Amino acid sequence: MWSIAYDSLLFVPWLEKASLATGLYLYAHQGDVVQAERYFERLSKEDRWVGEPETAMLIYSYATNGRTEDAIAVFEQLFPNREEGEFGSPKAIHYSIIIYAFAQKGDFSAMNEWLEIMASAGFPPDIYVYSIILRGFALRGDVDSIIAVLDQMRAANILPTVVTYTTAITLLARRKDPIAVESVYKRAIQEGIIPDRKMINTVMNAHVEAGSWNGVIRAFDYLNSSPMRHARLAIETYNTLLKAYILIGAPFRVVSKLFSRLESTGVRPDNITFTLLVQSACDSGLMDVASEIVEEMDRLSTQPNSDIKVDVYVLTIVMAGFLRLGNKIRAKEIYEEMQTRGIQPTSLTFGAILRAYGRENSDESLQIAEEFVNSLMSSESPRTWDAPAHGGKSALSQIYGPLIASFARKQRPKDVERVFQGYLDAGGAPTIGILSTLLNCYRCVFNVEAAKQVWPQIFQLGLRYTRMPTLFENTKGDVHLSRLQANILCIPLSIYIDVLSAAGLHTEIAEVWGKFQAHGFAFDSHNWNHLTVALIRAGEPERAFEVLERVILPFQRQTDHLLRLRNESPDTPLSFDRLPAREDLLSEPSEDPPMHSAERRAKAANTVFKQIRQASEEETDLFEGDSGDFAHPLRVLHQISPSWNIWAPHNATLSVLLMVLTRLQEGTLMDPVQPEGIPLTGADAQDQAKSAIAREILGRIYANYPKAVQVVLEHESKERRRLGSDYDQTYNWR
């Protein structure tokens, strides 16, 4: 629609050049090569209408998609032999865009070659060029290349700027590591960098991506109260805050109300704002509302100076929403609408379709899904969907990941291995997420040996994520950077602990736990809960209660306390300013990761909505909060959302501990799970002696771990009310 508005301006002679140049710029930044060439051709028909900006944008339309060969072909067509031609001679910006194209593609060798060509042409790379390169690698999440570029900058005595630091923070934010983000931010301050609004907003986004809701609120309050704000916050800050609401599972009525309040701030919603609103409506299952918002976006796109447009991301969100509700007909209509509009589907689009097939959970649907993947990979058409990852999952993992996960849920390891091999053959790289899916599949089918082969691969990938400390000089002593992405292996560790404990390999658990700790990785609440169950399986009930008493419950109380604190005028946007002792870092409490799964967000939104409806008028007013405080509802949601307090004993953990107390009260000891083929030890012991030992253990548990016992007994009361007459049968562990 917006292109129609620009086309209409072409009939006004004095606006024609400006309109064409603007259209070229917009299409180039979208990576729409066809339209960019169309506008460039119109410009080139007039004398002196094509200059440095126009030729640069034509090359950029290819570069932004990582199409390096095409970008070079256009470069050489415009500037034969890199000399003076019809459109002048190549300038620094033209070389920079070619270099950016290789950074987008991740081709470090070719990028260096063009850096030398650029220098030979009389344009030595400066901070601007290196910033472009860093941005390209940051979008790909390519840490190794970023480190190499920073080394080159140091060798050339080019000091990092606020843009350089913001690029590094952007990468860390996408890796969901707010602690390392804040450490880099502090490093920038020490180097004399004056943070701008974009840099602080990137810190805020790091907390959003990691689900560190207190950090989001603190960064927002800092921006909102800081003298540097001048007049008002920018739309980028409000977009980041709205994303936090969506990821925490806020009901649509909350997000919609905040969206409506934007008008009172004098800030105009942009395309990202509307996209977030569509996402919220779809998460809440309000597909009619989502469709109405899309129609409104179409209407706004025709207005002068509007940047609102219905793009592939908006339509993919709507299509995925219909698929989650099982409405294949409407989903297909949305997909066909993409084609009608000339919008190319992305890997996200195809991933949504593949996840829908997986949710059907039938052999036929999985066969269709696999055939769909094979057709994408064997198609002779250009892979327009195989675009750079932009910091998230790669295009190939978006395509193969849902199929691998579907076979894993059906506990079909051979099919998981086969599809995974196809992913590797297609050029995909092993990831912690995909390997963790494979590990969990082996856990479900009790294939211990296969799990033991996968775990070292996962651990090595985790170690690779700890290379960021060399990003900037003089960070060796920074305790936060020394544990970058320290929680990245928490999920696979829990899976592996369960594998080993169920197999009776208790000594190996201790070895894995110790190695994990020695390399500086952090343990989360799930790890400690799984360790508690593993200790029960190892026949060590006292140590299991000790973990609950001295680790899980204290961190639960600490998290609860931090939740209630808020300084609305902080003097820093940082939340991790206090450096804890090194030994404390290994079990530092973290908040629940954000719900990037739409299914989990929908469940959370439904739960919160029910709680709001049950609340009194006074509590509802508290939820809505002051109309001028955009972060207040997030703080309340943080308290009532079902996912807010991850530092808590799991119900499954409490049930196991309750069974332990019940058995000890009956005078029965806990026999450790033994490896296959090894008989139970102590089976010949006298019942009377075992009963006495059981009573002694029970006495020590009550004496040494009273808070843990209290929590377990409270769980018992809840279970008796829930199960009624079925309680004794459920907890008679015999």
Image (tube, rainbow, N blue to C red):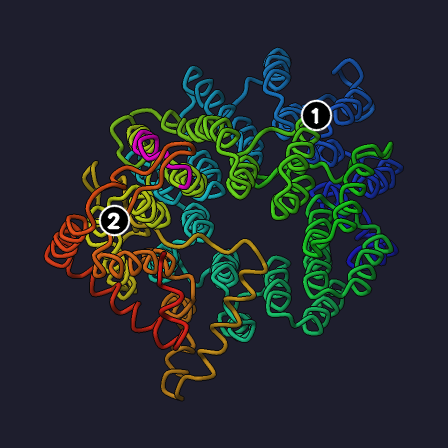
Q: SS of the residue at dot 2? A: helix
Magenta stretch: includes residue 389: no
Q: Is residue 663 left or right of residue 443?
A: left
Q: Name the image quarter holding residue 437.
A: top right
Q: Residue furthest bottom?
A: 617
Work out whether 447 lies above or below 692: above
Q: Quadrant of the C terminus?
A: bottom left
Work out whether 322 lies above or below 185: below
Q: Name the image quarter holding residue 165.
A: top left
Q: Is residue 301 left or right of residue 498?
A: right
Which numbered disc, 1 or 2, marks the residue that appears first in the sequence? 1
Tell me the residue that label 1 is attached to: 425
Other-residue count near label 1 (Cα within 10 Å), few / some / many at <14 / 14–19 / ≥20: few
Asked whether 279 or 91 is in front, the reply is 279
Specify start and end residues of the magenta stretch as a single range: 502-511
In the picture, the disc for residue 446 is none
Asked whether 56 or 520 is in front, the reply is 520
Q: SS of the residue at dot 1? A: helix
Magenta stretch: includes residue 505: yes
Tell me the residue that label 2 is attached to: 544
User: Mark 1: which amino acid?
Assistant: Asp
Asked whether 532 or 636 is in front, the reply is 532
Q: Position of residue 671 (x, y in %)?
A: 29, 45
- How many numbered tags mark residues here? 2
Residue at position x 39%, y 34% in the image = 675
Residue at position x 26%, y 61% in the image = 662
Q: Main secondary structure of the magenta part?
A: helix
